[in-house]
Image: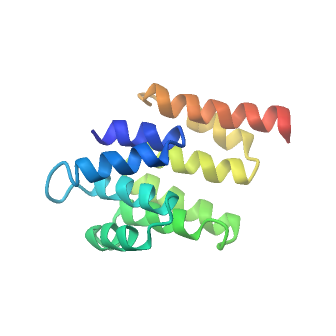
Amino acid sequence: MADALRDLLLEGRVEAANALVRAQPAESPGDDRWRWLAAMAALADSDAQALARHRAALPDGSGWALLLRAQEQAGKLPRRELAALVTEARARLGDHPDAVWLHAQVLDLQSDEDGLAALAALPDLPDSVRDFVHAKRIGLAFFD
């Protein structure tokens, strides 16, 4: 279910993502990935109450909490700080595809084609994440 939620968010289908979160509040107790994804859906929907609830369920300092902090601070932090935060989260999560997805968003903001190429080369990425990274690379090549 978490992969389905991630894919809905990658596609920008926020309404469908929030419907999935309401139907499946948590895959299992302490499922930090699900809480992070649910928080991302709440953030995309500007639902402050749901965002606060999911944020509170994440352990402080975890890779998932760092990813959420990065997403919440996007546009407020200098790009280098944001990239460092996401890189640290990615390291804590062992290059988890969800962290790669968020890192690709940050590298796109920085117009970092080399960084995106390095992400695209990571093994074992799901097709949806790999497609997202490639789309960001193509966007840089043709529109920047």
Which image quarter holds the N terminus? top left
User: Residue reaching furthest left?
Assistant: 29
Residue drawn at point x = 38 percent, y = 51 percent: 18
Which image quarter holds the C terminus? top right
Residue drawn at point x = 66 percent, y = 49 percent: 107
The front one of 31 and 5 is: 5
The front one of 82 and 132 is: 132
Residue drawn at point x = 48 percent, y = 60 percent: 88
Q: How many marks?
A: 0
- Can see residue 122? no
Q: Quadrant of residue 139?
A: top right
User: Residue reaching furthest top?
Assistant: 127
Q: Quadrant of residue 54?
A: bottom left
**As drawn, 106 above or below 75:** above
Relative horizontal placement of residue 119, taking residue 51 as reference (left or right): right
Relative horizontal placement of residue 50, taking residue 99 as reference (left or right): left
Q: Pinpoint residue 70: horizontal percent, then vertical percent.
A: 53, 65
Q: Pinpoint residue 15: horizontal percent, then vertical percent.
A: 45, 48
- Can see residue 20? yes
Q: Quadrant of residue 82?
A: bottom right
